[in-house]
Image: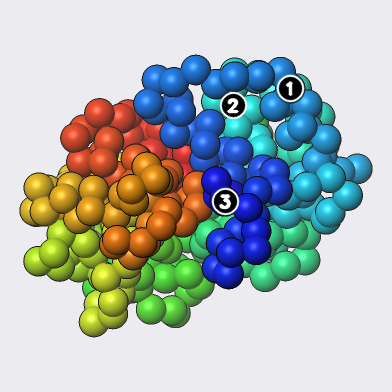
Amino acid sequence: MTAYKSPLGFKSDKAPQNFSAFHVVADMTLLHENIPNKNELSVVLNSSQNDDGGFSEQPSLLSELFTTYSVVFTEYILGDFTFNKEKCIDFVKECQNEDGGFGNAPGYPSDVWHTNFGTLLLHILDAEPLDRNKLIQYLLNTQNEDGGFSVIPNGTSETFSTFKVIDSLLILDIAIPNKKKTIHWLKKLQDKSGGFQYQEGKTISFVGSYHAIAALYILGSLPDDIESAKKWIACHQSTDGGFSRIENMPSDTTDEGFIAIHTLYMLEKLVNPYWIAIIT
């Protein structure tokens, strides 16, 4: 996930990771850069598919919905599904729970993050959830009075889950309840620095800012102070070319690069909102 060798304290090592591959391929596509060795990359990705149809972070590990999302959407960007699609669909469906939401693996409790991955996977694989109505109701139940959404029903609103729920509902072609209130709630989280609080009264968050801006973008809106948001994101670029969550620090991981590149493209209105909805 980084350009650095381990051990370097908080730095991850250079071992291949499907999650990292997904973000790098997405960034290179957005930047109109050639992706080398596509066939070899597909072989490596598909070697992580297990007998249950799901994918693991590396071969021989257990299947996860999150990693399955990373592999399937990397293959989507590359232009072809060369894995066992039907078994993959079966795995995703098995991750849906009785409450309508999805967990990270069959039997795991539901939350909106994994519900978003399950929704996006079935969408791109042209399949339906075991219970569409319960899925929609689970997502709707996470909206709060302030217009934001929480990670589980009756939780506290924050930008991470707000994006995930809005994203899922739009993909399911369901109108966002109290849309104007949601947009207002997101916009007021922007700090004078340009970044966003991830939750009212909480710290300014690099990842939370991406989710706030992405939620606004797919809702057809943008932050009130676009220029300060651009500058705030740009200030997180390190001298090595990568991006860090903290200014004036060595770059972190491919995740931070993905966040910065995609956020800046949104702020410039240079990316299709559908791409932002499915590539996250």
The secondary structure type at the circle numbered 2 is helix
Q: Are marks 1 and 2 in contact (CB under 8 Å)?
A: no
Q: Is 130 on the left or on the right of 189, as rendered? A: right
| Residue drawn at x 23%, y 53% as measured from the top left | 235
Mark pair 1, 3: CA separation: 23 Å
Q: Which residue is mark 1?
A: 40
State how the image is colored: rainbow
Q: Position of residue 115 (x, y in %)?
A: 57, 56
Q: Which is more toward the observer, 276 or 154? A: 276
Q: CA distance from mark 2 to mark 3?
A: 28 Å
Question: Is residue 272 in sight in this rendering?
Answer: yes
* Disc assigned to residue 76: 2
Please say if the residues under marks 1 and 3 sit with CB atoms less than 8 Å apart: no
Q: Residue at x 32, y 29 (%)?
A: 272
Residue 84 lies, with reference to residue 184, above or below; the image says above
Dot 2 amino acid type: Tyr
Name which residue type carries label 1: Glu
Q: Quadrant of residue 170?
A: top left
Q: Nearer the viewer, residue 140 or 29?
A: 29
Residue at image location 13% in from the left, 64% down from the top: 193
Q: Crowdedness of circle 2 by 10 Å Cα count: few (<14), some, many (20+)?
A: some
Q: Point out residue 223 in the picture as x, y percentages from the top left corner.
A: 15, 52
Q: Nearer the viewer, mark 1 or mark 2?
A: 1
- The mark nearer the N terminus, 2 or 3, is 3
At mark 1, the secondary structure is helix
